[in-house]
Image (cartoon, helix red, strand yellow):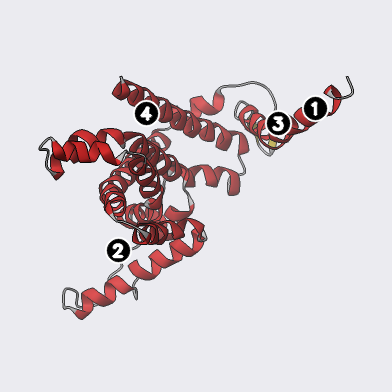
Amino acid sequence: MTRALPRFLLTAAALAVPVVLIVLPFGSFLMSAFWTKEGSEIIREFSLANFRDFFANATYVRVFLRTLLLCAQVTLIGLVIGYPVAYFIWRRRGAVRYLLLLAFVVPLFMSYIVKIYTMRSILGLNGFLNQILVGVGLLDKPSLVFLYNQTSILVTMSVIFLPFVILPVFLSLDRIPRNLVEASADMGAGTFGTLRHVVVPLSLPGVVAGCLFTFVLALGDFVTPQMVGGPTGFTFGRVIWSQFGLAFNWPFGAAMGVVLLSVSILVILLAGVALRRQRV
């Protein structure tokens, strides 16, 4: 009995931390989505009015669908660029491999704001890109075409979230036994054949993980659209932020957050189902 009590207390303390810091605040947030706001007062009674108002507003739905498309594009660009980079790093030998991997992973440890300002310094009016284009004569003068629009959001998000694709794909590739690749070559398969029939299928878990990381992170991002998108860069994350930070309609903002969370969970579940079917 004396030994069981300390074990019980340790277990209870370990469970209390996530419950107090995660479950209770998250539950409170979900609960507030079913409240309503009248004037400056929050009515704490169960209601679906916030969700009804959201889906009845064509502007909100249009912004939401446009944001989903943007996130899908960011994910696709990340995969198209990130997979070849991860494959190239995986094919290296010795310390070069890990130096290259470190070079692409280091941005994960940098401040998110610093990365956005770095992209602004590249895409801005006096940025690196404008200076090159003016220097080679493609532009007569610096242009704002690279900043404060949807394209700048797409480019910035794709660059910032690229390491989230490269790292999972590389780890998945690194788990592929070398003897399988060598056996494929011994049986007459060329580089492309081995890549198609051995490497890509075995690296799909990393591909799915990288795509999920990128899509979900891009879906909730509101800082990038605000800092590089300007007035035209209005995404769903900015809509939610405006409800909390400007309109002070927390129940409606929480309802939008629930919609965002539901889509994220649905995407994760669909990815899991697709991955299981591929394994079968």
Relative horizontal placement of residue 129, taking residue 216 as reference (left or right): left
Q: Which quadrant holds residue 190?
A: top left
How crowded pointer 1 is (Cα within 10 Å; few <14, some 14-19, many 20+) is rated as few
Q: Are marks 2 and 1 in contact (CB under 8 Å)?
A: no
Q: Quadrant of the C terminus?
A: top left
**Label 1 to label 3: alpha-carbon separation:** 18 Å
| Closer to viewer: mark 2 or mark 3 | 3
Q: Which residue is mark 3?
A: 19
Mark before the other along the chain sequence, 1 or 3: 1
**Label 4 to label 2: alpha-carbon separation:** 33 Å
Looking at the rendered structure, which numbered label has been put on residue 62? none
| Closer to viewer: mark 4 or mark 2 | 4
Query: Which amino acid type is marked by label 4?
Result: Ala
Relative horizontal placement of residue 25, taking residue 197 as reference (left or right): right
The percent coordinates of residue 107 (x first, y second) are 45, 59
The percent coordinates of residue 39 (x first, y second) are 66, 37
Q: Is residue 97 above or below residue 259?
A: below
Mark before the other along the chain sequence, 1 or 4: 1
Mark before the other along the chain sequence, 2 or 1: 1
Of residues 175 and 132, the one nearer the viewer is: 175
Q: Which residue is mark 2?
A: 146
Q: Which quadrant holds residue 252?
A: top right
**Label 1 to label 4: alpha-carbon separation:** 38 Å
**Can residue 207 be spotted in the picture?**
yes
**Label 2 to label 1: alpha-carbon separation:** 60 Å
Q: Are marks 2 and 3 in contact (CB under 8 Å)?
A: no
Say what secondary structure mark 4 lies in: helix
Q: Is residue 252 above or below residue 107?
A: above
**Can residue 142 be spotted in the picture?**
no
Q: Are marks 1 and 3 in contact (CB under 8 Å)?
A: no
